[in-house]
Structures are given as C-alpha cells and as structure tokens.
C-alpha cells in the first residue's frame, strides 16, 4: 500500500506537472509520450550483441502504418557462429552496415522481405571498392552513438560518416554527414540490394530487372524483385530521389554487371557516364549508379537525400517527395510531424493517469507500455492508392504486410478493434478487397503477394470477431446490442470471402518446404478436410490445420447466423466448428515426472480413422515445421488453444475442471518443454512465452469460477520474467506486433477470447489507465481502469471488480459491456480472493449457448 507521504508527494508532483504544462502546445504534449518509446526494445536476443531469438523489431523511422520505413541494413556475414542470424528488419546489433533502404517489416521470422531501394555513403577513394560487392565498402558502426526515437534513426559509421533519417508516408529524408570535404564523397545506388535469406536460399529475395535514369543530383526508376517470405514472383517498386549538398553538384555515373544473388562478381563493374541504364527481366544483369562529390576546401560536407517510393510510377514517387517532404521542411520538422502523428493516432489512446500512486510514474513500465503501442502500429502497411492491380478499387483501402494473420488473429486484431478502430475497419475492408480483386483473402501477405499460410485462414476468424463485437448480431447468447463501431465493412461480402476460403481448394503452389504445397492462400488439403472431417497424416500440418480450420468455421457460422443465411449453410458451419474433436485422441497420454500423467490430446489420424502415433509425443511438436504434424507448437500447447468457441468441451475432453486446472498449472512448470524453433522459444516449460499458440493459455484459469486469481499470479510472473524495457525485452520474435499486443493486454488487465465477444479479466499493472475506445468513430468513449491500492510488491490480487458501479461476478466481460466505456474498478489486496467464484461460465458451442 502506498504510504501517506507518497500520496501527498505524488499529488504534489502531478500538481507541478499540471502547472508546468499549462498552456503548452500539442507538440510538447506529443514529445512527452514519445519519449517513452524506445524503438530499440526487441532488437537483441538473450546473447548480448546477437539478434538470435530476439524480437527482430524494426528500429528505423516510420509513420504509423507507413509505407516508407527507412532503416539500416546490416550483414550477418563475417560474424561468429552463434551471433549471426538473418536480419528480418534490416537491423541487428552487430554486423556491418551495407545500406540504408526504404522498406522493412517488423518483428518477423522466416525468410526476410524488403531491405530494398537503397543508398550507401562511401567515403574516400574507390581503389579497394567493388561496387557490386558490399563486403568491399560495408562499414562497422558505433553502437554507443546509435540513436532511435519516434520519427528518427541515426548511426555513426566507424569511418566517420554519420547517417540520420526520418520518414513520411511514402518518402524519407536521409542525411549523410562526412567527416571532412578533402576526400571524395559518394552515394551508391544498388538496385540489387535486398535483405538476403541465408537460412533458405530457395526463399531469398532476388533482383529480376529494373531501370535507372539519372538527373542533376537526382535519379528515378523502378526495380522488380522475387522471393522473400510470401514468395512474390514480381514485386515492382518505383522510386525517385533528389539530393542536395552544400558542397555543390555531384557527378552521376551508372554501372552494370552479371548478377548472381549469392556471389559478387570477381571483377569490378566499370563506371560509365551513361545517364540511364536498364536491366531487362531475365537479362541476369545487376545495375546501379554512383554520385560522386570531388574533394573541396569547404568546411561542411553533408548530403541530404529525399527518396520517394510508389507502386504506380516514378513520377508518383517524385510527387510523394514534393507533397510530403518539400525542401522547406528540415529533418527536425519531419521528426516533429512524426511525433505528432504517433501521439495522436497511437500513443495517446492509452494514458497513464498520475493518481499519486508511485507506480503511475514508473518510467520502466511506461516505456514498456508506449513502446508496445508503437510497435503494434508499424504493420500492416497502408498502401492505399498504391495498388497497381486493382484499377477499379482505388476507393478501397489497401493494406499489405499482414505478416502474418496466424500471429495476429487472437490478440493483436482484437486490440486494434478497441483502440485503432478506424485503421481496423480499413484493414478489414482491405482483406475483402484482396479477395475481390485477387481471388482469396490474405493469411500471410507481403510485397503485394498473398503467402504464406501456416495453418488456418484467419481472415475468416478476424472478420467474424469484428462482426460479432460490432453488430451484436450473433447466434444465441452472442446476440447483443451492437454499437457498430467498425464502419464501412460490407458484411455480406465478408461472408462470401470467408465462405470461399472454406469451400474452394486453392491452386497447389509448389513449396520447397511442404510437399503438398498450397501455402499461398486459402485452405490446403481442403478436399481431405471435407471428405473425412479432418486432415490425415498424408498431408503436412494435419493436426494444426484441422484445429484451425474448425475454429475458423465457427467464425463463419457466427457470421452466417448474424446475416441470416439459409439453415443449410448454418448447419454446415455449425457442424464443422466441432471438427477439432475428430482429431482429439482420448487415449493419447503423456507422463510428467513427479507431476502425474495426462490423457487426451490432439493426435494425427489415418484416413481409416485409426490414430497414427508413430513419432508422436504430446510434449513435443515433432519438428514444428511446414512438413510436420503441427506448425510451430507442441501438441500440449496446441490443445489449450484448440477451441476458443467451445471451452466447455475442451475442459470435458481434458477430464473435467480439476484435471483441466492441473494440466494448466503443469504447463508452466519448468523443465518439461521442448524446442519449437530458436526464435520462438522462451523458458523451459511446456507453455512458451515466445509463441503465439501459447497466448491464451495463462488466462484459461478464468474458465473455472473461483480461479481468476491464478491467472493474475501466472501472468504477472510471465511479464516480470520475460518482458522488460531492455533491448532483449521480448521473449522471441515479436511477429508484426503480436508479442507487443500480448504485453499490452497484460498491462491493462484484460485478454480477449476471440472470436467470442468476450474478454478475460486478470489485473491491471497501473493504478489508473484511460483507454480511448473506438476513437474517431461515432461510438467513441473512454474506459477508465482503476486498481485501488495497487502495490507491485504486495497488493496485486483483485478482491472485487465493478463496472460502472455494478459488481462483476464472473471472470470475464462481454464486449457490449466493455464497449460502453466508463469505469472498470479493481479493489486490490495482498491475498488471492475468489471474487469470481459464483460467476457464470464462458458460453460454449457444445452446451447450446450459440444455437
Ligand atoms: C566489418 O567491416 C570491416 C571493414 O571492412 C571488416 O574488417 C570486418 O571484418 C567486418 N565485420 C564483419 C563482422 O564482417
Ligand atoms: C564493430 O564495432 C563494435 C564497436 O562499435 C565492436 O564492438 C565490434 O567488435 C566491431 N566488430 C567488428 C567485427 O569489427
Ligand atoms: C558524428 O556523430 C558524432 C557523435 O555521435 C560526433 O561526435 C561527430 O562529430 C559527428 N560527425 C560528423 C561528421 O558530423
Ligand atoms: C549460412 O547458411 C549456411 C548453410 O546453412 C551455414 O553453413 C552458414 O553458417 C550460414 N551463415 C551464417 C552467417 O549464418
Ligand atoms: C552482400 O553481399 C553478399 C555477397 O555478395 C550477398 O550475399 C548479400 O546478399 C549482400 N547484401 C546484404 C544486405 O548482405
Ligand atoms: C526530383 O528529381 C526528379 C528527377 O530528376 C524530378 O523530376 C523532380 O521534379 C525532383 N523533385 C523535387 C521535389 O525536386
Ligand atoms: C518499475 O516497474 C518495473 C517493471 O515492473 C519494476 O521492475 C521496478 O521495480 C519498478 N520500479 C519501481 C521504482 O517501483
Ligand atoms: C495415405 O497414404 C497411404 C500410404 O501411402 C495410402 O495407402 C493411403 O491411400 C493414403 N490415404 C489417403 C487418404 O490419401
Ligand atoms: C503413420 O505415419 C507415418 C509417418 O507419417 C507413416 O510413415 C505411416 O505410414 C503411417 N501409418 C499408417 C498406418 O498410415
Ligand atoms: C504463482 O505462480 C508461480 C509461477 O508459475 C508459481 O511458482 C507459484 O506457485 C504460484 N503461486 C501460487 C500461490 O499458486
Ligand atoms: C457517424 O454518424 C454520422 C451521422 O449519422 C454519419 O454520417 C457518419 O457516416 C458516421 N461516421 C462513422 C465513422 O460511422
């Protein structure tokens, strides 16, 4: 409990803060929240200096959901084993800088995408430089001088060149400061520059053609790439750049060489005075340009470069520069605009209220909160009006880099619904537009290409979740009064798009890592799923895909029901929603030494219905890859996430309340886990903090009335152990914002059980928080979450919970209750209390709640 003097001191401080902030401008306010964002959180793994098993967070400059994400690209070549890993966001703590490039993703694993449209400053003589071999000009950098903040990233190369950058929506400004003017200063433009995938040569990105036209201190053109995570076949990007330098005009030259993505040429390409050059598709040529400033006596030698990108034309890319970054704007102006955008559109949606409790001024917790909010809003990327293929759809929003919905469906998108409702509505429309213009909704997508589908088609699930919450038109107990906070979505089209996922077998794109392919979009092995009700072991990922298709089918059932589709349609999807039970083997069992044995697990099955337990162990994932029975999750983990729509059945299949609770508790015991892949592993328990399929489990104590306190205990331990404000502040790849959003739910004390319009109640980590719900819509409201007497050391167990003055007796809330806003108040105490023991259970499909 905070002492009396602490309260007095806190109120005094807040009074002071009030008086000093009196009359300040919005910009100062913006700076206040942005100072809590540290974009370098999540850039390092547990081994100091190494990015292995780290967050792969993108620390460069960006606007919220911006298409331009300028950042540095670093190489893993030359680093000792155990320190090197593919650099998915371009950044790694160690590794030489090979370029500054315009496009990046955030937090992803798998084969890198982007790191394209680059520039590299080269200082001094070119004698030892081969312009087509980055190892001849790359530069180590001073980590101590590296800075990342909202809207700006800067670094210092060990050759004395400083680089600093900021971003607007489709453009960036990059400044190069050279240590002196008495040597040549070059800017290299290499169209072949990409982030390579060492882990999978089949997946690495490759330059396939382009063109470059030079002007006076400027250039424009286009470049096309294949490969990367989504396996794009021809990802074409246009660009434009204008450079200014106080030391006069540069000499521009071009060069070309026989390009091999894996090996640099042994001879140096020759610089030629040609002001244009192109590499035709299939020519196998690489092309580039070099801008050279001769030595001068000037005192100051900086080059400022403005770069625009577009999917439409290079003229459009140039126009983006004129619109977004006219020369009248300095880098500082651009940074200030970025700070305001992040403050208004993202950070200010959740506010820590200084109520005198010292926790409300804990800067560590605030850095965790605001950095998580920031990192949740880097992807997906808004490419509206930049869709070359959808001529008639310019009015539809176009998002890309849903990288991937497998990571985002359970926790990230439900948080978007509450606090980024405008963007969320546009994202939903964009998923439907992709179906309309390209044939299928995305599950993974990047580089304007659908791919790759790891498990189910989760766009179905996300649309259903949004529909149930927003319209309140659901079956049975899911019917409620809707506030229609999600706007502009055509739900009939949403149903058609989801129905296609569940009804049409996609083309079988061949995939080097999954023999049965069909990883681009839609549901692979759908024929088998429909013939047998489950996928047999003759297909890859048979267990995880059966389970995920079934809960997506529940989503489609809910949508169909709300839209009053024919009984036959409802019946079909309602039945399919239970197919996860067909892959549940009641006799599969495992023993945890000293704990007990556990019976009943998901298990591979043969077409004749017999269980196939060859190389099967419920504690393991049997490889965890594209070709295995389960994708990136142990059988044990997968079981808990099998049926958000039918938790009553799940408890029954696990042997009833006591057996369920015992199994849940055992999930967190150290020592029983096995690896699901180094970038997603954390700790040694069967439950895995770094892995999305584990996200829901720690909240499932709330399914059994009287046990909500266990959720609080478990999740507090998890957050304290695995999350922090350090560079290794996340337990694995943050996956496009997935782990960032999981942390946020924990800080506010709630967690979704999508696609049900339900939130579990745990306990907030701040004494008073204000969340703006549905900002920018007609339903906007504020939810104030208060934890009276919260003390980090001793008083963190809820004793009672009220919503707008009415006691909450169950360990969960309906969306329509939360969506009213108002006051959610927790009374905290030192001992666990069973405040939820007389509460109603979460409704379930098998108990008839959704009939
Ligand atoms: C970085 O570049 C420097 C200078 O070329 C080189 O000596 C060093 O080996 C490189 N470091 C790595 C890790 O490749
Ligand atoms: C790169 O520079 C850092 C200092 O910033 C140094 O710790 C590291 O050893 C250097 N790496 C190499 C391979 O030169
Ligand atoms: C580069 O930045 C460092 C500080 O990080 C500064 O000491 C140095 O003067 C800068 N160099 C140039 C050329 O601006
Ligand atoms: C790249 O992959 C090869 C083959 O798997 C491996 O031997 C090598 O160590 C990897 N290099 C780095 C820098 O990770
Ligand atoms: C750097 O050069 C190597 C060797 O040519 C190449 O494999 C790699 O893709 C290049 N780019 C980066 C960003 O490392
Ligand atoms: C930048 O350069 C391009 C190509 O030379 C030119 O068309 C464009 O007008 C320039 N844009 C600005 C903003 O100066
Ligand atoms: C602030 O919060 C962090 C994270 O929960 C905690 O480790 C630290 O002890 C807190 N600091 C204070 C002064 O309470
Ligand atoms: C599965 O594979 C086995 C062995 O190759 C084969 O006998 C069986 O017909 C296959 N089942 C299906 C449903 O394709
Ligand atoms: C069981 O699975 C294994 C491994 O996939 C396979 O080799 C075997 O044929 C399967 N058994 C039956 C009876 O289908
Ligand atoms: C709280 O959780 C921790 C970590 O899982 C566990 O060790 C401890 O026993 C739990 N406390 C209680 C009272 O159950
Ligand atoms: C808000 O309500 C007004 C008036 O009914 C309507 O015109 C507008 O489209 C609504 N805006 C949104 C975002 O739903």
Image: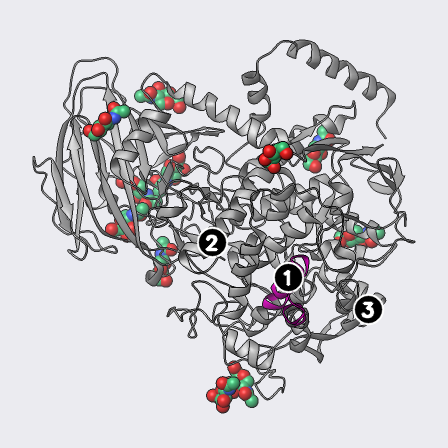
Main secondary structure found in the magenta portion: helix
User: Which residue corresponds to mark 2?
Assistant: 109
Contact, CB < 8 Å: mark 3 with mark 1?
no
Q: Does dot 1 land on a helix, a strand or a loop?
A: helix
Indicate whether 525 appears above or below 704.
Answer: below
Determine the image quadrant of residue 462.
bottom right
Task: Name the secondary structure under disc 3.
Answer: helix
Query: Which residue in the protein does label 1 denote?
Result: 560
Sequence order check: which comes first, mark 1 or mark 2?
2
Q: Mark 3 or mark 2, which is nearer the start of the sequence? A: 2
* The residue stretch that appears in magenta: 548-571
Q: Which of the two labelled residues, at mark 3 and mark 1, occupies the earlier sequence position? A: 1
Binning the other alpha carbons within 10 Å of mark 1 as few (below 14), some (14 to 19) or many (20 upward) gives: many
- Asked if residue 497 is among those painted magenta in the image, a careful observer would answer no
> Which residue is pictured at 29% across the width and 39% down the height?
118
Q: CA distance from mark 2 to mark 3?
A: 35 Å
Q: Which quadrant of the frame does ligand 1 lie within?
A: top left
Whole-number angstrom distance, CA of label 1 to CA of label 2: 35 Å
Q: Do tag 2 and tag 3 residues touch (Cβ < 8 Å)?
A: no
Query: Residue 465, image x and y in percent?
Result: 64, 53
Is 816 rendered above or below residue 792? below
Q: Which residue is mark 3?
A: 659
Disc 2 secondary structure class: loop
Q: Position of residue 439 (x, y in %)?
A: 43, 60
Nearer-the-camera pick, 78 or 34: 34
Of 625 and 675, which appears nearest the observer?
625
State left or right for residue 430 relative to residue 832.
left
For disc 2, the neighbor class at 10 Å (few under 14, some 14 to 19, many from 20) is: many
Depth order, front residue of 594/507: 507
Q: Nearer the viewer, mark 3 or mark 1?
A: 1
Give the quadrant of the N terminus. Answer: top right
């Amino acid at each position: 409990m905070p002492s009396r003097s602490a309260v007095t001191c806190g109120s005094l401080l807040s009074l002071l803060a009030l008086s000093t902030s009196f009359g300040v401008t919005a910009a100062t306010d913006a700076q206040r929240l942005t100072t809590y964002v540290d974009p370098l959180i999540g850039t390092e793994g547990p081994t100091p200096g190494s990015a292995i098993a780290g967050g792969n967070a993108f620390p460069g400059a960006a606007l919220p959901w911006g298409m331009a994400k300028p950042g540095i690209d670093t190489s893993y070549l030359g680093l000792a084993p155990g320190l090197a890993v593919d650099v998915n966001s371009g950044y790694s703590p160690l590794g030489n800088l090979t370029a500054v490039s315009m496009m990046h993703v955030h937090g992803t694993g798998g084969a890198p995408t982007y790191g394209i449209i680059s520039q590299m400053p080269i200082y001094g003589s070119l004698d030892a430089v081969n312009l087509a071999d980055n190892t001849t000009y790359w530069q180590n950098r001073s980590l101590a001088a590296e800075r990342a903040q909202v809207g700006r990233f800067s670094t210092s190369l060990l050759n004395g060149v400083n680089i600093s950058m900021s971003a607007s929506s489709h453009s960036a400004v990059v400044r190069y400061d050279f240590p002196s003017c008495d040597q040549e200063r070059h800017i290299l433009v290499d169209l072949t520059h990409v982030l390579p995938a060492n882990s999978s040569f089949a997946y690495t990105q490759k330059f396939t053609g382009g063109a470059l036209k030079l002007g006076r201190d400027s250039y424009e053109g286009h470049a096309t790439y294949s490969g990367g995570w989504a396996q794009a076949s021809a990802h074409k990007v246009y660009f434009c750049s204008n450079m200014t330098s106080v030391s006069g005009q540069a000499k521009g030259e071009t060069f070309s060489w026989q390009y091999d993505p894996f090996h640099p040429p042994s001879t140096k390409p020759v610089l030629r005075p040609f002001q244009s050059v192109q590499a035709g598709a299939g020519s196998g040529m690489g092309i580039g340009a070099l801008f050279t400033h001769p030595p001068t006596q000037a005192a100051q030698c900086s080059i400022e470069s403005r770069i625009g990108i577009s999917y439409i034309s290079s003229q459009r890319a140039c126009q983006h520069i004129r619109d977004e970054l006219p020369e009248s704007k300095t880098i500082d102006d651009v940074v200030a605009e970025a700070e305001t955008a992040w403050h208004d559109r993202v950070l200010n949606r959740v506010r820590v209220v200084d109520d005198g409790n010292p926790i409300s001024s804990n800067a560590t917790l605030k850095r965790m909160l605001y950095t998580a909010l920031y990192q949740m809003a880097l992807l997906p990327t808004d490419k509206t009006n930049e869709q070359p293929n959808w001529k008639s759809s310019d009015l539809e929003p176009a998002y890309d880099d849903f990288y991937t919905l497998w990571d985002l469906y359970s926790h990230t998108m439900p948080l978007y619904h509450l606090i980024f409702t405008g963007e969320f509505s546009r994202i939903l429309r964009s998923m439907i537009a992709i179906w309309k213009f390209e044939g299928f909704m995305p599950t993974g997508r990047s580089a304007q290409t659908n791919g790759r589908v790891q498990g189910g088609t989760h766009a179905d699930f996300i649309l259903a979740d949004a529909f149930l919450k927003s319209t309140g038109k659901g079956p049975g107990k899911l019917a409620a009064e809707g506030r229609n906070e999600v706007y502009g979505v055509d739900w009939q089209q949403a149903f058609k798009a989801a129905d296609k996922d569940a009804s049409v077998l996609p083309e079988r794109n061949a995939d080097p890592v999954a023999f049965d392919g069909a990883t681009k979009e839609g549901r692979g092995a759908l024929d088998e799923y429909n013939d047998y009700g489950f996928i047999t072991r003759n297909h890859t990922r048979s267990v995880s895909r059966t389970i995920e298709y079934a809960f997506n089918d529940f989503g489609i059932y809910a949508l169909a029901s709300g839209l009053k589709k024919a009984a036959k349609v409802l019946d079909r999807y309602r039945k399919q929603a239970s197919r996860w039970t067909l892959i549940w083997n009641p006799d599969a069992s495992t023993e945890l030494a000293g704990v007990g044995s556990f019976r009943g697990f998901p298990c591979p099955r043969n077409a004749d219905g017999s269980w196939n337990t060859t190389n099967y162990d419920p504690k393991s994932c049997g490889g965890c890859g594209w070709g295995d029975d389960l994708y990136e999750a142990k059988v044990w983990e997968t079981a808990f996430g099998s049926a958000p729509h039918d938790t009553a059945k799940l408890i029954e299949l696990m042997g009833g309340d006591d057996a369920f609770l015992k199994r849940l508790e055992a999930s967190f015991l150290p020592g029983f886990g096995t690896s699901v892949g180094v970038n997603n592993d954390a700790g040694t328990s069967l439950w895995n903090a770094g892995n999305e399929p584990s996200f829901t489990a720690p909240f499932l104590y709330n399914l059994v009335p009287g046990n909500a306190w266990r959720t609080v205990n478990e999740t507090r331990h998890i957050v304290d152990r695995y999350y922090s404000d350090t560079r290794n502040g996340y337990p694995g790849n943050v996956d496009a914002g997935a782990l960032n959003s999981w942390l946020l739910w924990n800080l506010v004390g709630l967690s979704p059980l999508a696609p049900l319009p339900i939130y579990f109640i745990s306990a907030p980590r701040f004494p008073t928080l204000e969340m703006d719900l549905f900002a920018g819509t007609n339903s906007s409201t504020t939810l104030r979450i208060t934890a009276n007497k919260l003390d980090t050391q001793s008083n963190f167990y809820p004793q009672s919970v009220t919503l707008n003055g009415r006691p909450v007796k169950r360990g969960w809330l309906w969306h329509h209750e939360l969506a009213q806003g108002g006051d959610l108040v927790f009374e905290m105490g030192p001992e666990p209390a069973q405040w939820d023991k007389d509460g109603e259970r979460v409704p379930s499909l098998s108990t008839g709640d959704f009939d």
